[in-house]
Each structure stands twice: as C-alpha cells, then as structure tokens.
Image (cartoon, rainbow, N blue to C red):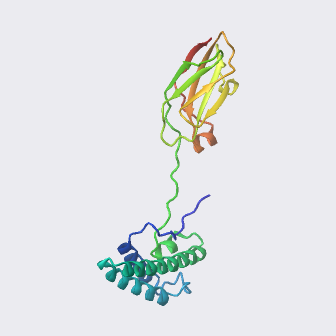
Amino acid sequence: MKVQKVLIHLGNVRDNDLASYAQKIVQRMTNNPNFTDPQPDLATLQAAISLYTAALIAAKDSTKENTASKNAARLVVENYLGTLGTYVNQNSGADLVKLDSSGFALSRLPAPIGILPAPTLIVRYGNNSGEVYFEIGFVAQATEYLVLYSPTPAPADDAEWYFTLFSSTKGTLSHLKSGTKYVFKVTATSPEANKMNTYNFSNPVEKFVP
C-alpha cells in the first residue's frame, strides 16, 4: 500500500519559486514540535537560501559567471531540501498532519481506476487460414484488453471461453479452427476489475473463420 510522503526531488521547480518554497519550509519548521532535530539544521538551510536569493538577483545580468554561481547556489539549496525532506519522511510515521506541517509539498496517491467502460470490437479476417485480426476501441486507463472467444454456441459461463490478453488495441489471433463460426468479445482490464473479477464486455461479434 502506497503512502504519502513529502516530495524531495525539486529539479522541475522554477528558480524564483524554489527560493520562496524553501523559505516557507524554514518558516513552517521553525519551532515545529513534530521535528525537533531537523537535518540539516534550519540555520544552515536559511544561509543557503540567502546566498541563493542573492545569486538570483545577480544572475539577472545573464553573464556566464553569475549564471554559474546561481546554478551552484541552487544545487546547494536543492541538496539541503532533499536531506531535510528525507528527515521529515523518516520522522513523520506517514502522519499526514505532521507531513503537512513541514511546509513540503506532498506526493499524490494514485486514484483507483475502477471498473472501466466496455470497449468496441471489430473483428476482420486475417491473412492466413484460421486467423482473425482485432481492432479494439481505446479505453483510457486500461492496463490490458482481455479477449474472450469460443466456437458457437458459446458457453454461458465466461470461465469456459478461451481467452487472450492484448497490451495494445490491435492484434491477431491465430490457430483457430478453420471452417468454424466463432464469437468474440473484449473488455478493458484494471487492477480493481481484476481483483473483483468484474468486467464490462463489448457486444459479442460472431465471425466465420475461413
């Protein structure tokens, strides 16, 4: 089971935003009873933020030297925040109140996908005897597509059908019995659907396999 943590990788944060973000963390963690021994200490982080802020101002003239100094100062702040974020994660016990009190941004928990809608299904003749070609309607968030097939008349219980899994919306099924009429249907799978063994299937498609 995934739990929320503070984010410690900050490479995508813009320069000016990083300075204000780091300053907010210092303010929120100062005298914070949830984190009594921050690593690194907040005075060290504050000094790095001050140097970085000054380097940001100097870098506005866009000289190579000032830009390099700004980048170096930013890296120091990023590294300190990464270490501090690790300390917060280790000392919060996954307590969301404690995590949020640090001022760090929190990771997002993945939302459950649920049971997905039924895709569409087109079945065409393949290039060889005993072969058919599938075109499955795309379903957002599907992990795979489960195709059930059976000679007609098909069993009432889906568990008695043949099945195959496709990772894409197009595929070929071979080694069918030539000269036989088959019925096909497809569903989009998700972790929740697989766990509950509950699916929304397409309308069945019957096809005589040459």
The residue furthest front is: 64
- Which one is in front, 154 or 138? 138
Above or below, comparing residue 145 to residue 152 in the picture: below
Q: Residue 146: percent from the left, percent from the top? A: 60, 32
In percent of width and height, residue 99 lies at: 51, 72
Counting from the top left corner in percent of width and height, residue 124 is at 54, 19
Q: Is residue 75 left or right of residue 63?
A: right
**Vertical comparison of 117 with 89: above or below:** above
Q: Is residue 195 above or below residue 67?
A: above
Q: Residue at x 54, y 85 (%)?
A: 40
Q: Residue sitting at 52 percent across and 27 percent down?
A: 135
Decide: is 98 above or below 173: below
Judge by depth and name the residue closer to the eye, 42 or 173.
173
Q: Is residue 204 left or right of residue 55?
A: right
Q: Quadrant of residue 193?
A: top right
Quadrant, the C terminus: top right
Number of numbered labels in the structure image: 0
Residue at 54% x, 67% y is: 5
Quarter of the picture containing the N terminus is bottom right
Residue in the foreground of this view, choosing between 14 and 59? 59
Instruction: Report the residue that reaches farthest toward the left.
Output: 61
> Hey, which residue is sitting farthest top in the picture?
179
Q: Residue at x 57, y 69 (%)?
A: 94
**Where residue 77 appears, x then y in whole percent?**
47, 80
